[in-house]
Amino acid sequence: TDHKVAALARRADFPGLVTASGAAWHYLDSAATAQKPQAVIDAASRAMGRDYATVHRGVYARSAEMTLAYEAARRRVAQFIGGQEDELVFTRGATEAINLVAQSWGLANLKSGDRILLSELEHHSNIVPWQMLAERVGAQIDVCPLTDDGRIDLDAAQAILTSDHKLVAFAHVSNVLGSVLDARRAADLAHAVGAKILIDGCQAVPRLPVDVTALDCDFYAFSAHKLYGPTGIGALWAKADILNAMPPWQGGGAMIDKVTFARTTYAPAPQRFEAGTPAIVEAIAFGAACDYVSAIGLEAIHAHEAELVAQTRDALRQMNDITLFGPEDSAGIVSFSIDGIHPHDLGTILDEENVAIRAGHHCAQPLMDKLGVPATARASFGIYSDETDVAALVRGIERTKRIFG
Ligand code: PMP
């Protein structure tokens, strides 16, 4: 296509987008983790420097200010996905958020004979915690199939769901296929049989406007590092009545009301789920990432990435021996394979051209089995991606095909 897609954000905002020798780096692995804008780096640096102190217990002014900043970040992150601050727990990331739900809500609410519905495209972090829970309580896991173009098949989900199902856990956007779930319909289907629904929003939050209230989901999990924020922090949002009824998970400081050797009482949610000194610096930088992304706007980001996906899919379709996975309207992610060339070999040759893609099973081995491949190559976009990245990818693939041809 002759469309021109200028990066939505200035590349100069992202110090990570150059190679060690200062050349342009065609970073096409934002679905694994996004590069950070200087505004986020500066927020972290200030929080770790001149503003640094602990939260929640200091009697001195600096700590009181840090507590306000930490709680403001919670408000900011909650608001970013359309939730309330008392419904948002800071976790280490999406993985920890899902484990928290499995071990706190899951152990309290599931029993032998209950069923959990997952889908064929889930990331291991939305499979394994449920398997661990199911094994402990004697629950069963059902797997919802995909449509031919790689979406979670909600008609099939409707047919599978029974009153034995206590939980549905689906990805909002697939990290391999980029397919977007109709999360509101999935929530309605779950609720119709009395089940709760957890949405794994890792890949959706950086790519689509998300409003947990409109989606009517019960739990929503995501990580800051894919949203242009720091590693080591993420969030679990849960409906207030569900979160308030959940038993504590990890024990320690900050999550208690009163401790004696005879009996301990617990703080209300969300503090009840944040044992220990929290990731103060990371939380503040997470809030700054929400500000940065909001200033650009998720509608614009979604449209921008859709354009890059269309360009990439069009270019790859012109080549022989390439299989494209996932739907045409994939959100920011293009997975493909080339006959006779292992994705790792492709990734290695692309790296020589300063093009970074992901090659592997993408922590979705059951999906690889379903696709009938050991691995795929994956290009994924962000707000700084543009048509020069797509062109570099296409040049690199052509060269790889010549080498292996
Ligand atoms: N779910 C999906 C869809 C993901 O893409 C990822 C990260 N690859 C995760 C869950 C896990 O996120 P994290 O490793 O940040 O906890």
Image (cartoon, rainbow, N blue to C red):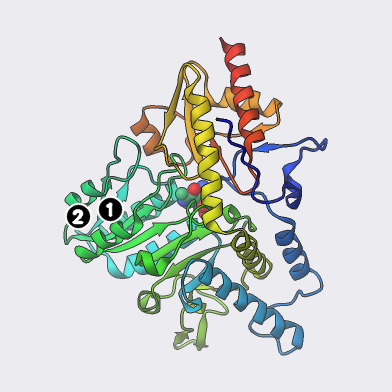
Q: Nearer the viewer, residue 306 or 278?
A: 306
The percent position of residue 383, horizontal first and vertical second, equals 62, 49
In the picture, the quarter occupied by the C terminus is: top right
Horizontal side, residue 153 vs residue 347: left or right: left
In the picture, the quarter occupied by the N terminus is: top right
Q: Tell me the quarter of the picture where residue 19 sits.
A: top right
Kindly identify which residue carries mark 1: 117
Is any part of residue 376 visible from this angle?
A: no
Outermost residue, top side:
405
* Residue type, numbered disc 2: Leu
Q: Nearer the viewer, residue 210 or 62?
A: 210
Q: Which mark is residue 161?
A: 2
Q: Is residue 285 above or below residue 397?
A: below
Is any part of residue 25 visible from this angle?
A: yes
* Residue type, numbered disc 1: Leu
Kindly check if marks 2 and 1 are in contact, taking CB atoms under 8 A apart as contact: yes
Q: Nearer the viewer, residue 304 or 357?
A: 304
The percent position of residue 318, horizontal first and vertical second, equals 49, 21
Q: CA distance from mark 2 to mark 1?
A: 8 Å
The percent position of residue 323, horizontal first and vertical second, equals 43, 24
Q: Nearer the viewer, residue 316 or 353?
A: 316
Dot 1 lies on which element? strand
Dot 2 lies on which element? loop
Outermost residue, front side:
2
Q: Is residue 193 above or below residue 300?
A: below
Residue positioned 71% across, 83% down in the render: 65
